[in-house]
Image (tube, helix red, strand yellow):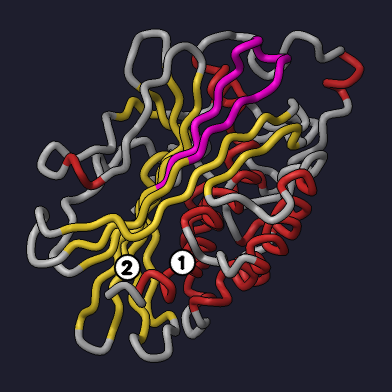
């Protein structure tokens, strides 16, 4: 149970060892700024689906996806390359991370029958990963919220965050008098590698990050249990740190079951492990609104059922990815 007086900051550790007769999807989006905070953000995404048979050694890679994106400080795509290649990658240049990017990306992926593939997860996640990536600078500089090149007049006009999520509900301790986030009280946690030493092949290859770098990492396991599909998922936003190792600002674990034939959600539990403010875990209490929803509809239904202060931006990102489960289940 979450402590109402403190933000959660206890990592669940590495991903679990893969189960027999299961499918695992892993994904990472690494962000860096080779030219400094005011320069372009370089984002590298990789994802992989692995089918495990009778034991860990009995496994095969079923699908992969990757992207390289150059984005502005305002989260606009300036250059993009993907594997597999999109029908019109140039059509995404100038698109800003958020609803605009998700709509444009979904249109191209639909044309190539790539919805719910590893590439879809990565590109859909560009919006959330680009939003949180700048937090990495908080580990390396005291002035991270006011990067070089951003004038005081522009900073004064940064948007109010009040009401956008459970963590920023009106009156929350996370907000200053102007309705903007309080960076001075943000919580975080030191975290270890997500690669389980008992299952090193449980992740795709994770690149070493040097200097200021952010990583959004996900894993999702599914397996059949009688007439149900069992689902476990993990999500973490973490940064490099000057002292070495990594610090996380967001981490969730999610467990769920769905009917095997209809792929309709039957149960759902979210475990907030690391979050920046004490109000953030409140969103986990609202997720049962989704019970009875077909998994294939989750990318839209999560946003409809958990808007504003009912949800958490990052928990919603975890839950939206459950829309991929029906496609993953076909591999079983």
Residue at the spot of label 1: 322
Circles 1 and 2, Cβ within 8 Å, touching? The answer is yes
**Residue 234 seen in the figure:** no
Residue 148 lies, with reference to residue 289, above or below; the image says above
* Secondary structure category for the residue under label 2: strand
Residue drawn at 20 percent across, 50 percent down: 16
Answer above or below: position of 38 versus 280: above
How much space separates mark 1 and mark 2, taking CA atoms?
9 Å
Taking depth in this image into account, of 252 and 32 the one nearest to the observer is 32
Q: Quadrant of residue 261?
A: bottom left
Q: Residue 203, percent across and down?
A: 28, 43
Q: Is the C terminus in the top left, top right, bottom left or bottom right quadrant?
A: bottom left
Give x and y (percent) for residue 158: 82, 29
Q: Dividing the image into 4 quarters, which one contains the N terminus?
A: bottom left
Relative placement, left or right, of 126 versus 147 is left
Residue 199, magenta (yes or no)? no
User: Can you give x and y, in whole percent of width and height, for residue 85 in the image?
Assistant: 60, 50
Quick one: label 1 or label 2, which is nearer the N terminus? Answer: 2
Label 1: few (<14), some or many (≥20) within 10 Å?
A: many
**What element does badge 1 sit on?**
helix
* Span colored in magenta: 27-45
Q: Is residue 181 above or below residue 140?
A: below
With respect to residue 94, does 24 lie above or below? below
> Residue 32's image quarter?
top right
Q: In the drawing, what numbered circle is on residue 94?
A: none
Give the residue drawn at x 45%, y 42%.
46
Left or right, residue 117 beside residue 70: left
Residue at 72% of width from left, 44% of height from top?
97
Residue beneath label 2, please?
231
Q: Residues within 10 Å of mark 2 (few under 14, many from 20)?
A: many
């Amino acid at each position: 149970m979450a402590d109402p007086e403190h933000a959660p900051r206890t990592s669940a550790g590495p991903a679990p060892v893969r189960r027999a007769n299961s499918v695992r999807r892993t994904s990472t989006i690494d962000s860096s700024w080779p030219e400094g905070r005011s320069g372009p953000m370089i984002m590298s995404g990789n994802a992989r689906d692995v089918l495990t048979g009778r034991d860990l050694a009995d496994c095969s890679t079923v699908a992969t996806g990757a992207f390289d994106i150059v984005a502005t400080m305002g989260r606009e795509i300036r250059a993009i390359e993907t594997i597999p290649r999109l029908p019109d990658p140039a059509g995404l240049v100038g698109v800003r991370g958020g609803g605009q990017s998700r709509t444009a990306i979904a249109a191209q992926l639909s044309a190539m029958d790539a919805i719910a593939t590893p590439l879809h997860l990565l590109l859909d996640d560009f919006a959330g990963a680009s939003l949180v990536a700048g937090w990495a600078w908080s580990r390396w500089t005291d002035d991270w919220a006011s990067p070089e090149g951003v004038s005081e007049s522009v900073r004064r006009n940064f948007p109010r965050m009040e009401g956008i999520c459970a963590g920023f509900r009106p009156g929350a301790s996370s907000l200053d008098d102007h309705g903007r986030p309080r960076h001075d009280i943000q919580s975080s946690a030191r975290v270890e590698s997500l690669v389980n030493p008992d299952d090193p092949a449980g992740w795709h290859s994770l690149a070493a990050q040097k200097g200021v770098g952010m990583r959004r990492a996900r894993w999702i396991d599914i397996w059949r249990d009688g007439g149900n599909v069992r689902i476990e998922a993990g999500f973490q936003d973490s940064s490099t740190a000057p002292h070495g190792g990594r610090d996380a600002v967001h981490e969730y674990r999610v467990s769920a079951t769905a009917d095997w034939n209809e792929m309709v959600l039957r149960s759902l539990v979210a475990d907030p492990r690391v979050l920046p403010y004490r109000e953030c875990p409140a969103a986990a209490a609202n997720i049962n609104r989704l019970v009875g929803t077909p998994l294939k509809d989750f990318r839209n239904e999560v946003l409809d059922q958990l808007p504003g202060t009912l949800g958490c931006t990052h928990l919603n990102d975890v839950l939206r990815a459950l829309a991929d489960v029906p496609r993953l289940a076909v591999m079983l």
